[in-house]
Image (cartoon, rainbow, N blue to C red):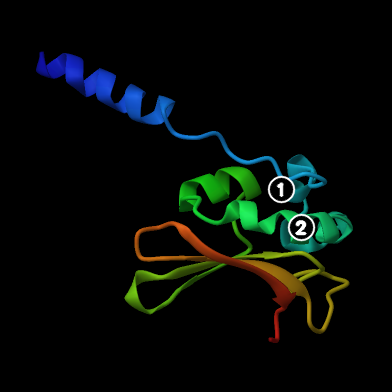
């Protein structure tokens, strides 16, 4: 009986999790391939992303990474809050970087869920 529950419970938990949201106008394959926004593909999707960013709220860290890919920057803040940043326009590691690149910042609460999502120039 115990062996049965070790296999069935995880399957039930993962099968019942809601599907990832679809961000209309954002091609996730192009987004994930454009690390640090260096190729300019993310910048082309900025307007659509601005309209759809609230769909990221409430997602877990793992869901955000599954949807957007590995973050360009990670920051651990007090009280176990985390910030994941994704450059929308060419970031500091790009050859044609901007002085104040725009980035999408996802703030996670201590439980690991996206609490706020903003897009702004990184100097702000």
Q: Which residue is mark 1?
A: 32
What kind of element bears circle 1?
helix
Q: Which residue appears farthest toward the left when viewing the image?
A: 1
Residue 31 higher or lower than 13, as above or below: below
Residue 93 in percent (x, y) is at 74, 71
Mark closest to the chain's N terminus, 2 or 1: 1
Foreground mark, 2 or 1, reads 2
Q: Real-space Cα distance between discs 2 and 1?
A: 19 Å
Instruction: Indicate left or right for 121 with 61 as reference.
Output: right
Q: Which mark is residue 51?
A: 2
Residue 122 in percent (x, y) is at 70, 80
Q: Which mark is residue 59?
A: none
Instruction: Indicate left or right for 92 with 77 as reference.
Output: right
Q: Residue at (26%, 19%) from the top-left corner?
A: 7
What kind of element bears circle 2?
helix
Q: Residues within 10 Å of mark 2 (few under 14, many from 20)?
A: few
Quarter of the rendering occupied by the N terminus: top left
Q: Marks 2 and 1: CB-CB under 8 Å?
A: no
> Which of the 4 image quadrants contains residue 109?
bottom left
Q: Residues within 10 Å of mark 1 (few under 14, many from 20)?
A: many
Q: Residue at (35%, 65%) from the top-left corner?
A: 110
Quarter of the rendering occupied by the C terminus: bottom right
Q: Residue at (33%, 75%) from the top-left corner?
A: 79
Residue 11 in percent (x, y) is at 35, 22
Residue 63 in percent (x, y) is at 52, 45
Count of numbered circles in the view: 2
> Which of the 4 image quadrants contains residue 116?
bottom right
Residue 122 higher or lower than 119, as above or below: below
Residue 9 higher or lower than 40, as above or below: above
Q: Residue at (73%, 63%) from the top-left corner?
A: 36
């Amino acid at each position: 009986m115990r062996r049965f529950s070790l296999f069935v419970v995880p399957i039930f938990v993962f099968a019942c999790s809601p599907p990832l949201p679809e961000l209309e106008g954002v091609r996730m394959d192009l987004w994930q391939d454009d690390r640090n926004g260096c190729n300019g593909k993310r910048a082309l999707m900025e307007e659509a992303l601005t309209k759809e960013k609230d769909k990221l709220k409430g997602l877990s860290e793992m869901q955000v990474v599954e949807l957007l890919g590995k973050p360009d920057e990670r920051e651990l803040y007090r009280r176990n809050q985390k910030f994941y940043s994704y450059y929308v326009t060419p970031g500091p590691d790009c050859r044609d970087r901007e002085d104040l690149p725009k980035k999408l910042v996802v703030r996670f609460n201590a439980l690991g869920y996206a609490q706020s999502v903003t897009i702004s120039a990184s100097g702000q």
